Structure formats: structure tokens, C-alpha cells
Amino acid sequence: MISYLDGHHDVSDDGWEWGEAHRVCLRMAYRYASNPSEAEDIAQDALLRAWRRRSTLREADRRNQWLATIVRNEAFRQHARVRPDPTSAIETYEAVEDAQVLATVERADLHAALRRLSDRDRQLLELRYTEDLTQQAIARRLGIPEGTVKVRLHRARDKLRRAYVLQ
């Protein structure tokens, strides 16, 4: 029975005063920890390991040195554990969010630039890029020569590029 949990300092059936052992472990854990929470984790893990291996202690008068070794080893184990980095998850989420915002802004800019074009230029670009028609198919649909479609598409793209850049 570990009696330190109820605030008493009684010696347990196995001859240990676990409350004192916990305080020793916690005091030593602070040497290796970067914050109180980490020190508590190290101390708890060390105390549990000490309790499980209490029968291996050969010299009772060297109990604190034995605990110090366990705490040190637990601290090294704690630091060796691979933990997910919460900042990378946050940065990944924010990067996705930033990309979505950027894409939305770019779409809004593109739509604004398209509104600056003439109806004829906008129609040509929509047929080519929204309906994915070839120049030959656009020429047939509009009843104009394919060469004319080619020149008008080139000019419409150029106007769109300039309108988009000037935003």
C-alpha cells in the first residue's frame, strides 16, 4: 500500500515510507525536467519502477542513491520518447488554412479581372477553360475561322493577365 496518497507518512508493509520516496524522486526529477509537469511525470514513473523493483535494493541505507539512479534513468527515458510536436500540427493546419484563404483571394481577383474583359473575350475564355473546348470546337460553335479563335484567345489571355496583375 502506498500511504503518501492520503497524506500520512506511515511505513508500508514492505518497510518503505512511500511519501518520503515520492518527495525524494520529485526533488531529483526537477534536476532533469524543463517544467513542473515533466518533473511530476518523471517522479511518478521512477516511483512506480522503484515500487516494482523494491526487492532488488541490497542496502537499505543507500535507498536515496538507488532512487536517484532510477530517477535519472526515467528522465533519460522520458527525453528519449518520441512525442508528436504540437507546433508542427498547428503549423500544418495553419498552412492549409492559409492556402485556402490565398486560393479564395486569387479566385476573387481572377473573377474581378474577368469582369473587366469584354463579353466576347470572356465568352472565348469560358469556352476554352470552363467547357474545355478545343480551338477547333470553339470556331465551329461561334461560326468563325479557327485562326481568328487562336488570335482572340491569345489577346484575351493577355488582357486577363494584365488585368489580374494590376489588381
Image (cartoon, grey):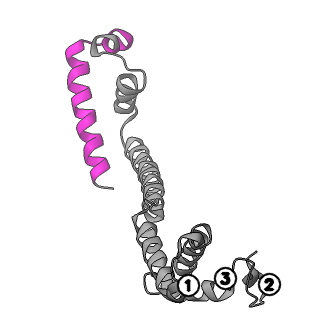
Q: What residue is at 26 percent from the left and 20 percent from the top?
A: 149
Label 3 environment density (alpha carbons within 10 Å; few <14, some 14–19, many ≥20): some
Q: Main secondary structure of the magenta part?
A: helix
Label 1 environment density (alpha carbons within 10 Å; few <14, some 14–19, many ≥20): few
Secondary element under disc 1, as helix, strand or loop, is helix
Residues tagged 3 and 1 counted as in contact (Cβ below 8 A):
no
Residue 162, given in percent of the width and then of the height, sits at 25, 47
What number is the disc on residue 6? 2
Secondary element under disc 2, as helix, strand or loop, is helix
What number is the disc on residue 60? 1
The residue beneath circle 3 is 16
Q: What residue is at 34 percent from the left and 15 percent from the top?
A: 138
Bounds of the magenta span? Answer: 138-165
The magenta stretch spans residue 152: yes
* Side of 63 relative to 150 (left or right): right
- Residue 155 location, quadrant: top left
Choose mark 1 or mark 2, whichever is in front: 1
